């Protein structure tokens, strides 16, 4: 850049002034700065010198990172200096815009609480470095998940596409972590695209094929992309983007709540439809879980930043001792206090909002819906006490901020440039519930079914997309009348998905003719799901040619699932040729799953040549899974089959399959080719299989190459496998090298791994230092890490120190882990101390976990004590556990108390778990006796 190109000399001077101020603040000279930024001394001198040509964006980015200055602000000044403002980049035709031009709040980073004294003057460096349109962001505290993201960003910078989805509860820092992670890419000229307008789904479907290299794809609240009717198509499009070498590198970042992760990653039951195969494949190996609280290392970092002048962090540290700093900064405690202490109309309005969101309504709730739905949430006395202008007063109070910009409900003002009529966009006069209250409602109101006014208001005011989801919610709660009416209302608006959903409701009621007509209507209107459902129905009715035509129509419309379903039906019927033809057509449409499943089925049936041919076809379509599965099956055969397995692994490894690379790395290590093994393991780690480095480290450790093992374990940690050092330490401990093992456990603990502390506690117990073990466990628990206390509780119980065990288990539970109480309860039950077991189980229940209670119920039922089992199941049911209600309903049925069984089953259905009603109907029709006992207690469903 020459000096003649400068459009705004003042901006360039300001840029240089900030760089020089940063250098002085760090106390380093230009030579030291050049070393820190990995730049030449002359480059740094010219960048800081008045009159010299302006620095490049790469130079500014490197200097900003070395000086810990905000890259976005400095690159903004550089763009201003050379006339490259927003207008200059608006018409490039590329998706998104440069990262440094984004405001973090526009990307849905939470507004933070405003602590006293955080409003700095206009020239404050801190104000400039972390201020968005909604206020100042607190200084950022890096935690282990940030290292995983940093590695992914480095790999992207090196030219390789990648993806990560951060999983955590509301307000745990997921979106902020993604924002901080992409800042290095801002200095390198990367763009960021947030699919949002007119709706997230429409934007993603329309424009994912247009994403260009060096773009961050921002999928915040990823359930709005990979969930729902179009979720599988979007997941497939993202997968195609990540594997398209011509468009690499791209970086896809997303966030999810844990309940959505559980839904998408759960495998379907045998014989049941698989609703999320593409989403599960996309997310596998790309999920990073965030803790819901800061550990002691992160707390120490936060204290250091607070001491250095960050008043927001200081304010948070003063007001919470639980380690939940991000939740406090997002205003969560005050939001919850406002809700719990609210007057009846305010609380009722928030209850309506919580119920709407947990049952599937969109995020933007129209004021008309809220006003109408709230009626039945108020008792007669509460309704009589309302003032004449109560609704205005209620909305004024519920939208009043608790901290800065945070409020229980926020008014949403749609931008005139966006099509407010589009599904998913904010309609006029609508409100959005605070995320933290939404998640609180999912837990606290999980067993409640909304009253009549809720369903009627939904029918009258909500969008078709919301009505479809609420129709499902009504159906599983056995509100069949409302299920039909809501789906009908959505269908009457012309929503093709609603027609298909209404058809499913009619099918469930046995109205086959009406269902077929509705599906045909939806298919004619463009619903691919309806086409697929019709295809399956036609095939089962014996009209195979018609079924294939319908499935082909769906594939041509971008949804190849129908062809895949027909392929598997033909394979099961013995028509392998037709099955293969359909699977190939499905792969051409983007769904390789049928080819993979057919290949595996044929391999197991002994048709190895046909299986391998199908696997190769899947690989050509971009899916090497079949080759790896075939290889795994052949490994169980003789020497010839094992040789064939190696050939298949090599073929899959050549095109980057992570599992194959990991397997080949282990094989080369065994053969003594260490250099080749390391190269393969690193490739596997870059492809998402960090365990390859762990396995290699274990093999080196077993061979006595301790230093090499530690280096490989450290590389595995950097690649995302946080337990690598612990595994090496365990091998060392088993070999008798206790000092070496303890050193590695301490190193892992210092890196924030909670399991390492538990192992250190065990070592101290074995070494005869019980006081040291307890001191370490207590320190860890006080810092928010319960694992060491939980493990020590187990050891104390085994040593018959029951009082000590119970105290430590309670300490672990207070720090967030009730599993220690559950284990102690089981141990005492087996030892015959039934009273002590019940007491411990109740303590766990009081802390929000009914697992211990239900496990004791299982144990007592297995021992023939049905009365004791029923008593425990009743405790869990009264606490809102819908699975406990189901178990108790079945117990009551077997005891002959049908009235109570019916009531319990209906209570469970109201809470979203209709399985008790189905189970009772099954028992009454079949007349079967007691079911097998000692079933394990599954977690409650995410509603």
Image (cartoon, rainbow, N blue to C red):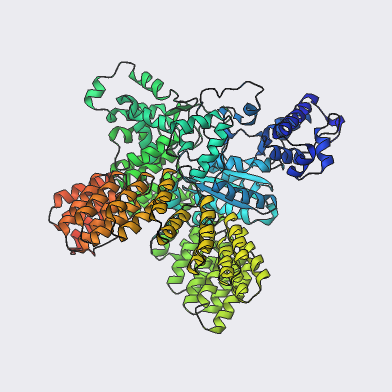
**Residue lying furthest left in this view?**
896
Q: Is residue 146 left or right of residue 223?
A: right
Residue 50 in percent (x, y) is at 84, 29
Residue at (26% x, 51% y) in the render: 841
**Residue lying furthest top in this view?**
388
For the C terminus, which image quadrant?
top left
Residue 741 in percent (x, y) is at 51, 62
Picture quadrant of residue 815: top left
Residue 88 in percent (x, y) is at 74, 32
- The answer to whether residue 615 of the structure is visible from this angle is yes
Pick the residue in front: 674 or 781: 781
Residue 502 in percent (x, y) is at 37, 47
Residue at (39% x, 21% y) in the render: 397
Q: Is residue 645 above or below residue 856?
A: below
Residue at (51% x, 67% y) in the render: 731
Pick the residue in front: 538 or 252: 252
Residue at (15% x, 56% y) in the render: 867
Picture quadrant of residue 680: bottom right
For the N terminus, which image quadrant?
top right
Q: Is residue 567 above or below residue 460?
A: below
Q: Is residue 290 left or right of residue 333?
A: right
Picture quadrant of residue 708: bottom right
Numbered-mark total? 0
Q: Is residue 860 above or below residue 197?
A: below
Pick the residue in front: 488 or 258: 258
- The answer to whether residue 915 of the structure is visible from this angle is no
């Amino acid at each position: 850049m020459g000096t003649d190109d400068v459009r705004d000399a003042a901006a360039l001077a300001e840029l240089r002034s900030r760089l020089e101020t940063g250098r002085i603040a760090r106390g380093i000279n230009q030579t030291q700065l050049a070393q820190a930024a990995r730049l030449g001394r002359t480059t740094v001198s010219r960048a800081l010198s008045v009159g010299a040509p302006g620095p490049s964006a790469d130079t500014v980015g490197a200097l900003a990172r070395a000086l810990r200055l905000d890259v976005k602000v400095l690159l903004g000044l550089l763009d201003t200096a050379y006339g490259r403002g927003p207008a200059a980049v608006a018409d490039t035709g590329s998706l998104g815009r440069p990262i440094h031009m984004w405001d973090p709040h526009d990307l849905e980073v939470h507004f933070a609480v405003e602590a006293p004294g955080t409003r700095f003057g206009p020239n404050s460096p801190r104000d400039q470095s972390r201020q968005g349109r909604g206020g100042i962001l607190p200084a950022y505290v890096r935690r282990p998940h940030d290292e995983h993201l940093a590695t992914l960003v480095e790999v992207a910078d090196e030219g390789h596409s990648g993806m990560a989805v951060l999983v955590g509860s509301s307000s745990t820092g997921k979106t902020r972590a993604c924002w901080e992670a992409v800042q290095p890419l801002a200095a390198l000229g990367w763009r960021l695209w947030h699919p949002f307008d007119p709706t997230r789904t429409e934007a993603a479907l329309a424009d994912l094929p247009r994403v260009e290299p060096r773009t961050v794809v921002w999928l915040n609240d990823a359930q709005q992309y990979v969930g729902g009717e179009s979720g599988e198509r979007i997941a497939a499009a993202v997968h195609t983007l990540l594997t398209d070498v011509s468009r690499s590198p791209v970086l896809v970042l997303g966030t999810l709540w844990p309940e959505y992760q559980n839904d998408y990653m759960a495998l379907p039951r045998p014989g049941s439809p698989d609703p999320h195969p593409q989403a599960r494949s996309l997310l596998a190996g790309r999920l990073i879980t965030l803790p819901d609280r800061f550990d002691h290392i992160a707390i120490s970092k936060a204290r250091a930043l607070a001491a250095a002048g960050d008043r927001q962090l200081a304010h948070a540290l003063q007001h919470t001792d639980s380690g939940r700093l991000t939740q406090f900064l997002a205003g969560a405690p005050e939001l919850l206090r406002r809700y719990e202490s609210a007057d009846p109309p305010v609380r009722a309005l928030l209850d309506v909002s919580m119920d709407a969101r947990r049952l599937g309504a969109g995020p933007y709730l129209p004021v008309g819906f809220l006003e109408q739905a709230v009626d039945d949430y108020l008792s007669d006395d509460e309704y009589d006490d309302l003032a004449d202008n109560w609704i205005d007063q209620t909305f004024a109070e519920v939208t009043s901020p608790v901290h800065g910009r945070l409020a229980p409900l926020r008014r949403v003002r749609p931008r005139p440039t966006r099509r407010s009529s589009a599904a998913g966009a904010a309609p006029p006069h609508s409100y959005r519930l605070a995320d933290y209250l939404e998640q609180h409602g999912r837990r606290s109101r999980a067993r409640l079914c909304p009253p009549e006014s809720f369903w009627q208001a939904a029918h009258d005011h909500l969008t078709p997309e919301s009505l479809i989801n609420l129709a499902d919610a009504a159906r599983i709660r056995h509100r069949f009348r409302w299920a039909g009416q809501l789906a009908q209302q959505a269908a009457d608006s012309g929503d093709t998905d609603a027609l298909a959903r209404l058809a499913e409701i009619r099918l469930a009621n046995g109205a086959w003719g009406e269902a077929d007509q509705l599906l045909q209507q939806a298919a004619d209107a463009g619903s691919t799901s309806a086409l697929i459902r019709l295809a399956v129905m036609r095939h089962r009715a014996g009209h195979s040619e018609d079924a294939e035509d319908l499935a082909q129509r769906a594939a041509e419309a971008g949804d190849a699932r129908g062809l895949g379903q027909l392929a598997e039906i033909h394979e099961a019927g013995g028509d392998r040729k037709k099955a293969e033809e359909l699977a190939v057509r499905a792969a051409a449409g983007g769904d390789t799953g049928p080819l993979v499943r057919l290949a595996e089925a044929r391999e197991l049936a002994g048709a190895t040549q046909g299986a391998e041919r199908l696997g190769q076809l899947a690989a050509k379509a971009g899916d090497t899974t079949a080759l790896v599965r075939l290889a795994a099956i052949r490994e169980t055969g003789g020497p010839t089959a094992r040789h064939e397995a190696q050939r298949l692994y090599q073929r899959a490894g050549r095109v980057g399959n992570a599992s194959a690379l990991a397997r080949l790395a282990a094989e080369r290590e065994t053969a003594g080719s260490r250099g080749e093994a390391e190269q393969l393991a690193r490739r596997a780690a870059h492809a998402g299989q960090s365990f390859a480095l762990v396995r290699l480290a274990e093999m080196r450790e077993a061979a006595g190459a301790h230093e090499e093992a530690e280096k490989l374990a450290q590389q595995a940690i950097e690649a995302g496998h946080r337990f690598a050092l612990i595994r090496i330490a365990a091998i060392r401990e088993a070999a008798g090298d206790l000092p070496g093992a303890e050193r590695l456990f301490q190193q892992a603990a210092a890196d924030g791994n909670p399991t390492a502390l538990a192992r250190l506690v065990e070592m101290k117990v074995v070494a005869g230092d019980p006081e040291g073990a307890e001191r370490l466990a207590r320190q860890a628990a006080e810092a928010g890490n319960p694992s060491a206390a939980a493990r020590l509780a187990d050891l104390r119980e085994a040593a018959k120190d029951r009082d000590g065990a119970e105290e430590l288990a309670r300490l672990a539970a207070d720090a967030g882990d009730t599993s220690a109480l559950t284990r102690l309860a089981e141990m005492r039950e087996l030892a015959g101390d039934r009273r002590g077991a019940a007491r411990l189980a109740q303590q766990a229940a009081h802390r929000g976990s009914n697992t211990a209670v239900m496990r004791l119920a299982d144990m007592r039922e297995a021992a023939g004590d049905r009365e004791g089992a029923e008593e425990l199941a009743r405790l869990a049911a009264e606490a809102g556990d819908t699975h406990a209600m189901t178990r108790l309903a079945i117990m009551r049925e077997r005891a002959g108390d049908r009235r109570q069984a019916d009531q319990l089953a209906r209570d469970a259905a109201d809470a979203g778990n209709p399985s008790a009603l189905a189970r009772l109907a099954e028992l009454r029709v079949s007349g079967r006796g007691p079911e097998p006992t000692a079933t394990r207690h599954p977690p409650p469903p995410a509603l």
